[in-house]
Amino acid sequence: MGLLGSLGLPPIVGPTVSPSQTAPVHNKQAPPQVPEAPLLKSTITLVNASPRELTFVKSALDFPTAKFEPLVPVSIPANGGKVLFRVVEPTIGPKKTAGMAWFSYPGKKGKVDVIFAWSGKKAEVKVIGDGTFTRQTQAVEDLDRGNEYRMLFKEGKADAGEMLPPMEDPDAPPEQPVADGKPNPPAKVTIVNESGFGMTLGSSELKQQATFKSQPPKTVDGGRTGHFEVQSGTPDWPATAGKVTYTFTADDPADPNAPGVVQTANFEWEGNNWTGGLNPGAEDFKVVVDGGTDNYRFTLVGPKLEFAPPAEAKEPTLRKGDKSGDAWVEYLQTALNYHINAGLEVDGDFGGRTLKAVKAFQRKYKKQGVLEDGIVGDQTWSYLREGAPAKPKTDGRKPHSYVEKGAEARWFKEKDWVIYDYGGDALLMMALSLGDVALVENRKVRFRVVNPAGVQKVLDRPVGPAITETKDQRVHMVAIQQFSTLFDEAHTGNADGGDYQVTAYLPADLGGDTYTGVLNIMGDGAEPPRSS
């Protein structure tokens, strides 16, 4: 049984924006061949008229040849925020666009899910959560030019006369104010991150009726540069004024594995005045500003990331009769289904069928010295997780007494399980939440990636939301999006072909599990991949 199946996941069949947005995923395989055909481009407009920002959860398309262009944004701003994107698909199949974009926000009684869905001539906004909501939709089907969908969400009742905005062409340039018969040129803002710590957009605001000609980037990774443009709002005020903030978590200099301190970088400009700063401030970081009235440049200067894997926690010993409130038995059952196609129900109950599967797995490695005793100790775990072989040993605890209190996580395997999504240009890995509480999402994972030329990058990425779960076990995806630009910001298309050395570790308080493996990517001019 494949890993996706053993984890209860369907095959990945479409482009990705987040771990949950489906895409064709391959490792050591040639990318899928899509016949050339005319493209059907459908435009989707999502409007958030509520006072709360909507955060992206996942998205999907019904047809495997379809893709998002551009990718679904990671959030929709509050109070009239609007995002536009397209679904592009060859017309060799059904001329029908169908898909969904799922967002959420924290409500008064818990998370509220807002799901924008479309199919053929229909569009729908589904809301799961507390409160009263206004939803408006409009769909226009044009099988020659492409369908158009507009969907609005508002928390509470609609205001009198509130309507959806007119349909727009995502490719149309914004209107520009004119002074003396000539458009005012937009101001260019550049955000440079010369530290090793990735920055995430916190807020953005403009003054003097200015508008964003292009949006501030949602993230600016360490060693990367981001750009956006601001258009003046009136001929009487040709200069622009605004402020953007970015947040990042700085390491504790005394202990890189300790929880860091969240810093906010403030970048502000008005006419020929511009300032930058940090809150609360960190000794090793500073903001440098330069530029001019129409060209502002803000640079975060700081230390590079240290790659220092913590000591790894051991896995608990499991025996027949174990049935605790954590997810270790479920992890065991998932691993057995993957390795020997055991066909176990992943229910967290170490019963007779699980014992039989454990012994069958141990027999498989008898020649390597694995003891067939039905006990899952250090040695059996090392073969299940494909780590360094260990000798037979238990954790020394009283049988059936251990429960993993708090948050804990592991990579599914210690090596050779990293995949590249050709459709979404993302490196993907899976982490399992194993403790008795679900506090793994958004925790920091530190990566070290060495490309085929030997160039190394160290970067952090958050653990994504759970994409599937059983009784206690949750499966999370960790992604490096836009992987092709990791070593070359101007790169387009899939990443360059060859072998990438990937090492990644989870936080120490989640067990400090470290993964090491090789990602083989088929790219232009690459040798055919070796079979695994």
Image: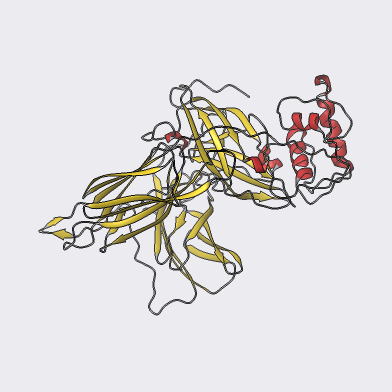
- Residue 303, picture quadrant: top left
Q: Nearer the viewer, residue 265 or 70?
A: 265
Q: Nearer the viewer, residue 494 or 511?
A: 511
**Residue 237 coordinates in the image, percent (x, y):** 19, 61
Q: Residue at x 58, y 21 (%)?
A: 530
Confirm whether residue 368 shows in the render: yes
Q: In the shown orientation, is residue 106 left or right of residue 377?
A: left
Q: Residue furthest bottom?
A: 160
- Residue 415, picture quadrant: top right
**Residue 80 coordinates in the image, percent (x, y):** 39, 66
Q: Nearer the viewer, residue 359 or 43?
A: 359
Colouring of the image: secondary structure
Q: Quadrant of the C terminus?
A: top right
**Residue 531 coordinates in the image, percent (x, y):** 61, 23
Confirm whether residue 119 shows in the render: no
Residue 154, above or below 457: below
